[in-house]
Amino acid sequence: MAIGLVATAAIGVAQLSGLAVAVTAAARDTTAASLLASAKAEQLLALQWAYTTDASGALIPVSDSTTDLSVVPASAGGPGLSASPPGTLFANRPPYVDYLDASGTWVGTGAAPPPGSRYVRRWAIVHGPGDLLVVQVMVTTVAVERRIAGTRPSGRLPGEAWLIASRARMGP
């Protein structure tokens, strides 16, 4: 009888240990995804989105429309803060996607994750009313992407991070 009790307790502890490992891994991915989303939002919000004045003193809106932040280092030839096409948060649409390894180091861009990718980071740029800029960033894991295989349910999935930030155009 004592052996039966010990065996039952051991099975329960083993199941709890497995659950603890899974929860810890999901928490690690969520934390990393949050940091990676924040880093991309900061990159995007650092691009030029302001006013300048012309010779007569009139305000002219200026914004970055050429920086490509899907590559490292950032380069010319991208959309900058131009409004992104619909669906860039839900599909790998260059130049609104990049891939990172387990340590958060950039490993590439493109329609499919390159070897060594752990995280998929996508972003969308929306021009709101007036001079409002809205930046949306979603980070998930390659494993989650493979598991859902194009049938994304609504809402955030375990291990994902979603971030929305806004910025108003500032004058000189």
Image: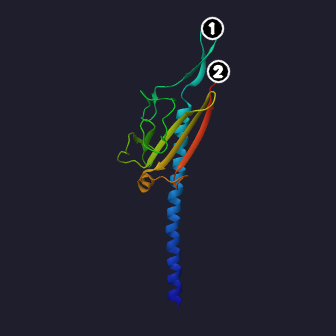
The residue closer to the viewer here, 94 or 68, is 94
- Hey, what amino acid is under mark 1? Ser
Q: Residue furthest top?
A: 56
Vertical placement of residue 4 versus 87, above or below:
below
Vertical placement of residue 41 versus 157, above or below:
above
Query: Are there few (<14), some (14-19), or many (20+) residues within 10 Å of tag 2?
Result: few
What kind of colouring is applied to the model shown?
rainbow
- Hey, what amino acid is under mark 2? Gly
Vertical placement of residue 170 versus 9, above or below:
above
Residue 89, label in figure: none
Give the x, y percent position of residue 24.
Answer: 53, 60
Q: Is residue 119 left or right of residue 165?
A: left
The residue closer to the viewer here, 139 or 21, is 139
Vertical placement of residue 66 versus 149, above or below:
above
Residue 128: quadrant of the picture: top right
Identify the residue at horizontal 38%, vertical 42% (top origin): 111
Give the x, y percent position of residue 68.
Answer: 44, 31
Residue 73: quadrant of the picture: top left
Residue annotated with mark 2: 171
| Picture quarter with the C terminus | top right
Q: Residue furthest left?
A: 115
Q: Is residue 39 left or right of residue 150?
A: right
The residue closer to the viewer here, 149 or 118, is 149
Give the Cα separation between the discs numbered 1 and 2.
Answer: 15 Å
Q: Is residue 134 left or right of residue 90?
A: right
Give the x, y percent position of residue 97.
Answer: 44, 40
- First reached walking from the N terminus: tag 1 or tag 2: 1
Residue 56, label in figure: 1
Give the x, y percent position of residue 145.
Answer: 43, 52
Helix, strand or loop for disc 2: loop
